[in-house]
Amino acid sequence: MNRLLDIRNLHVSFDTHAGEVKAVRGVDFHLDKGETLAIVGESGSGKSVTTKALMRLIPNPPGRIKEGQMLFEGRDLVSLSEKEMEKLRGKDISMIFQDPMTSLNPTMKVGKQLMEPLIKHQKMSKSDARKRAVELLELVGLPNPEARMSQFPHQFSGGQRQRVVIGIALACNPKILIADEPTTALDVTIQAQILELMKELQKKIETAIIFITHDLGVVANVADRVAVMYGGQVVETGTVDEIFYDPRHPYTWGLLSSMPSLDTDEESELQAIPGTPPDLLHPPKGDAFALRSEYALKIDFEKEPPTYQLSPTHFVKSWLLHPSAPEVEPPASVRQQMKPMPNNFEKPVLAGEVR
Amino acid sequence: MAEKLVEIKQLKQYFNEGKPNMVKAVDGISFDIYRGETLGLVGESGCGKSTTGRTIIRLYEATDGQVLFNGKDVHGKKSKAELKEFNRKMQMIFQDPYASLNPRMKVADIIAEGIDLHGLAKNKKERMEKVYKLLETVGLNREHANRYPHEFSGGQRQRIGIARALAVEPEFIIADEPISALDVSIQAQVVNLMKQLQAERGLTYLFIAHDLSMVKYISDRIGVMYFGKLVELAPSDVLYNNPLHPYTQSLLSAIPLPDPEHERSRRRKTYDPAIHNYAPDEKVEMREVEPGHFVYCSERELEAYQTNV
């Protein structure tokens, strides 16, 4: 097994004046060596909180990890001390943020910012770190790296800054790279370059990537597996093909059909998901998506659905997969893309009942 | 749809003119917008698409060129009454629904500001009736009138922005990246609303965006901008199926689509302006390659493009 990370039943809450906001409510997922897992979902679905919890970057107070385990190579990150966490951060697990304009220090030369993790974590000497920093700039495709070392972030364009940030994140050959909407602030052509760069580097240093985004085109491009989050929970996970060609959760259907593909014809209306995401101060009873779903069953309003398993890799948290649930048809635009999946079981089973 | 509502002729917008740091944000572009259509304007950041929109609505004084609205010049000297009339007919929806609404004003006052300025309501009762109706039109309800912007989500705020634009019964709306700041599922709600309003009221839109799949969905025709110039203008299907300018081709080939198999086989093209290899005396301008399909090119390139149609 190449299991690198195993997150089990993670709960994260924030204590506010109005009460406890349950931002993450029982998240399970895992990450294997060298793979890319995309996490998709709307703002407020808990995707960023989950990854911040993983880095133990949730400010306490008001936030706290209430329950659950985060096993990284067998060690539970939840119980590590801040000192031990510091040794991991930026070395074994590093992170790229959405906004390349604010994630670099504007008053510090780019070279110094690249050398920082090398000196701190790799205990390199200054001159070795310098050499490695130049290599890193070259690796992320910046021409003239020697001269770039002594420049400040404002002398770089948005795409170049994101390249620098990637360079810093990869400085210590991390085992996990968390990329939180790394291309959202960039233009499509620059986005394409950055995605290509990340894939190429992943091959070279075998980093596993957790890629957070809400752009399903990007997901289709980078991901090996996808986790769909809604209301602080993972509602569906599967390989990228399973999610795009055989989605089973109504929220995944909603996401897929609310984006026009280039051949959506202009006369047909986009399938908007009605309403707004749930208020996690008072999480809904039962299925969090039921209020916005036209496929909601009566039980969805009473009892939280269990997780069903459709294949060794495909998990769905929905009552619709219960043996006595009525047959439903996904929206037309999703149906058009459907393909049979070779690894599917004969019928869905409750997760945990297999093997 | 042959009637021209807006005509843009050789529009130029230079910043810091005459100084060493002069920027030619918009550099001599011409196009028409027909009544009732949606014209999409796409391009990367810094290409001048937002500046074009802002100059058309006279948020900036144009450096050179003309903008005709219903045959009348928008720029140039105007009496107050003329200006007011013009301001009423042309409205704008902004990108950031958090920054474009005054946080200290109630929603009712935000929406009614235009109604008050233009004297479109005879009394208080009529004013509030109009506000309620507008709120309902954009899918909010009348109870929302007494709240403040911070009480709303991004999608709801964008709806308020749309209601404000609609309040003065405009003919033409410039939407500058109206959905870029919203979540995917909410984007679809706002786009559907804009389409529905267009069908009901015969509105004309200039839709500025960088999300190309959404632009294709909403637009009848699309213009592509690159470094202050319009490089290609065509009906949306034609532009997507048969892009001629190499920049348009590179832009389209960079969009990731929500289809893993397509993504595995997608090849990205890069654009290098040097491939044009224009001679110093060559005249480069917008030329019509096929009816309705314009490309910024030289005489020589035109012939090559025409064989590709």
Image (cartoon, coloured by chain):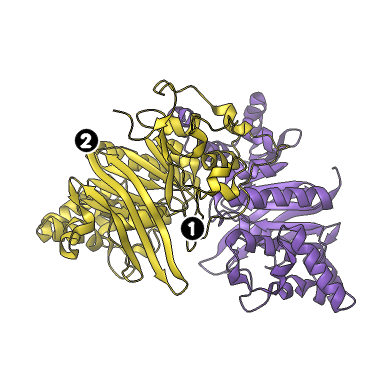
Chain colours: A yellow, B purple
Identity of the amino acid at label 2? Answer: Asn
Q: Label 1: how many residues lie within 10 Å, few (<14), some (14-19) or many (20+)? A: some
The answer to which quarter of the image holds residue B283 is top right
Specify whether A323 is left or right of A126.
right
**Who's the residue at 59% across and 33% down the image?**
A330
Count residues near mark 2 (Cα–Cα under 10 Å), then give few for <14, some for 14-19, many for 20+. Answer: few
In the drawing, what numbered circle is on residue A112? none
**Residue A282 visible in this rendered orientation of the protein:** yes
Residue type highlighted by circle 1 = Pro
The residue drawn where x is 27% and y is 50% is: A137
Q: Is residue B7 left or right of residue A345?
A: right
- Which quarter of the picture shows residue A148? bottom left
Element carrying mark 2 = loop
Q: CB of mark 1 within 8 Å of CB of mark 2? A: no
- Residue B243 in sight: no
The dot on residue A2 is: 2
Q: Residue furthest right?
A: B122
Q: Earlier in the sequence, mark 1 or mark 2?
A: 2
Above or below for B77 versus B192: below
Q: Relative to A102, is A74 on the left or the right?
A: left
Point 47% across, 30% down: residue = B266
x and y, in percent, of residue A213 in the image: 44, 48
Where's residue A254, x and y in %?
A: 57, 42
Q: Is residue A51 left or right of residue B94?
A: left
Q: Position of residue A68 (x, y in %)?
A: 29, 53
Identify the mark at residue A283; answer none if there is no mark.
1
Q: How far across and down, in percent of the image, does residue A141 sit?
A: 32, 45
The relative height of residue A108 versus residue A256 in the rendered view (above or below) is below
The structure residue drawn at horizontal position 47% and vertical position 38%, both measured from the top left corner, is B270
